[in-house]
Amino acid sequence: MADQPPGLDLDRLHAHLALAHPGLTAGPLSAQLIAGGKSNLTYTVSDGGSRWVLRRPPLGHVLATAHDMAREYRVISALAGTAVPVPATHLLCEDPEVLGAPFYLMEEVGGTVYRTAEDTADLGTDRARRLSAHLVDVLGELHAVDPAEVGLAGFGRPEGYMTRQVERWHRQFEASRSREIKGMEELYQRLRGSVPTAQRVAVVHGDYRLDNAIFSADDRVAAVLDWEMATLGDPLADLGLMQVYWDIAREVPENPVSSAVSAEAGFPAMAELVARYADRSGLDTTPLPWYVAFARYKLAIIAEGIHYRFTQGKTVGGGFSHIGAMVPPLVAAALESLLTEGS
């Protein structure tokens, strides 16, 4: 039997696929854990001829339910046939007895994922601009999808989405804080007191960024990945978070969360992409500074949670020792964004 990566019993998987999807596999399976991704685990699986991708919750997942996997599987399956490129889905298993947690299987999409500055260093300006343009065009296509038309009318609760997000992340911060962060309370109060009215109900990806897409050789998006945070909500939330990741990569090249986008590699400033998005989506991006402030707030709280776990010795792997230093600048920049907007 082939070596088995953690969290994947290949014999049990092979037996399940033989029953649930006869003819899909043609022989014994091998698998490899894919690097990247911050929560759900992703593997390549092969029978020696064909290859697929399998997603399951992390090891030690407290709530081993089908909820997260079923949501990912549902949204990816629903978007098949739209202008949003997604992998084809093959099978959802909600029974945790097979692998210890629910999982789903989808096609492996060929191409390149740009995760680091080294990955993009040799792109050149023309290619960097081309893939940036298509990345933001695909975001516009996602936000143009009518959820009801693709069977996602009940996928989330769009009413009050951003208000709930502000409160949710505030609770998260209170649960994992280990120090005083200057400006955090002011930021929270300003955000909750100035939530914009959503212009459209859209399928929101929840973590739209360069390294959550696979690019083909012609620098177009071949597939958008990592739909675990997808829901129905305010489309500008995606654009605001994309801008924060974009700006952090350009402003702080050595940061531990986003480094692939840089001016040196030829990537355009986000303002150019925002204008392109506005032109194609028909949405008014005037309120975007609020969404950028919220995205920085959210990222600061995520970073503070990682910092808190790091100080307790509960993180696994490297790259966490400096993440706490990101938090105060993120909060300060978020407040500056709100003040720029005049909130």
Image (cartoon, rainbow, N blue to C red):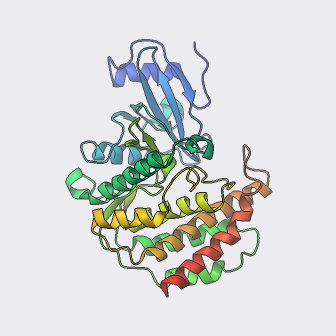
Lateral position of residue 251 relative to residue 70, left or right: right
Question: Could you tell me which residue is drawn at 31 percent across and 48 percent down?
Answer: 84
Q: In this picture, is 318 found above or below 111?
A: below
Q: Name the foreground residue: 158 vs 123.
A: 123
Q: Residue furthest left?
A: 149
The reply to whether residue 70 is in sight is yes
How far across and how far down the image is residue 120, in percent? 55, 44
Image spot of residue 283 (x, y percent): 31, 70
Q: Quick check: 159 left or right of 294?
A: left
Q: How many marks?
A: 0
Residue 7 quadrant: top right
Residue 270 % position (x, y): 47, 63
Nearer to us in this view, 133 or 79: 133
Give the side of residue 253 with respect to residue 220, left or right: right
Q: Quadrant of the N terminus?
A: top right
Q: Residue at x 75, y 50 (%)?
A: 314
